[in-house]
Image (cartoon, grey):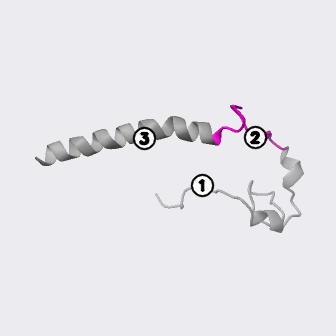
Amino acid sequence: MLKIIFKALADMFLSLFGLLGPLLDSILTVGGEDNPHDFKGSFLEEGELLSKSNKGFCLTGTKSLPVGLSYRNGLVIGGDGKR
């Protein structure tokens, strides 16, 4: 009995999301454009942000960010030093 209920709920959710997908795509697409934004990603040279005289977050072991940039939009991933 429970298996039938779960199967019915799963089918209901799948059909609901099947209908919502195209609807959300049409709402989020501005004026029929596939790419509604004008953002351009690019990389900077190391020297444009990092310097030995900066006192912010150290990224290379010898060069650091300015203090103001050290508090903005950062994601740091690394080990904790334990083995």
Instruction: Identify residue type, mark 1.
Output: Ile
Instruction: Identify residue type, mark 3.
Output: Phe
Sequence-first tag of 1 and 3: 3
Q: How far apart are labels 1 and 2 at the CA level? A: 29 Å
Q: State the residue position of label 3.
A: 17
Q: Position of residue 54 (x, y in %)?
A: 86, 64
| Residue that appears at 60% across and 36% down | 26
Residue 45 falls within the magenta-colored stretch? no
- Quarter of the image for residue 51 reads bottom right
Count of numbered marks:
3
Q: Position of residue 31 (x, y in %)?
A: 72, 35
Q: State the residue position of label 2.
A: 37
- Quarter of the image for residue 18 reads top left
Sequence-first tag of 1 and 2: 2
**Foreground disc of the pair 1, 2:** 2
Q: Is residue 27 left or right of residue 55?
A: left
| Residue that appears at 35% across and 43% down | 13
Q: Position of residue 42 (x, y in %)?
A: 80, 39
Give the extent of the magenta segment: 28-44
Instruction: Identify residue type, mark 2.
Output: His
**Foreground disc of the pair 3, 2:** 3
Q: Nearer the viewer, residue 73 or 7?
A: 7
Q: What secondary structure is found at the residue carrying circle 1?
A: loop
Q: State the residue position of label 1.
A: 77
Main SS of residues in magenta: loop
Q: Position of residue 4 (x, y in %)?
A: 16, 42
Q: Residue furthest left?
A: 1
Within 10 Å of the Cα at label 3, are there few (<14), some (14-19), or many (20+) other Cα atoms? few
Q: How far apart are labels 3 and 2 at the CA level? A: 26 Å
| Residue that appears at 52% across and 35% down | 22
Q: Nearer the viewer, residue 75 or 78?
A: 75
Q: What secondary structure is found at the residue carrying circle 2?
A: loop
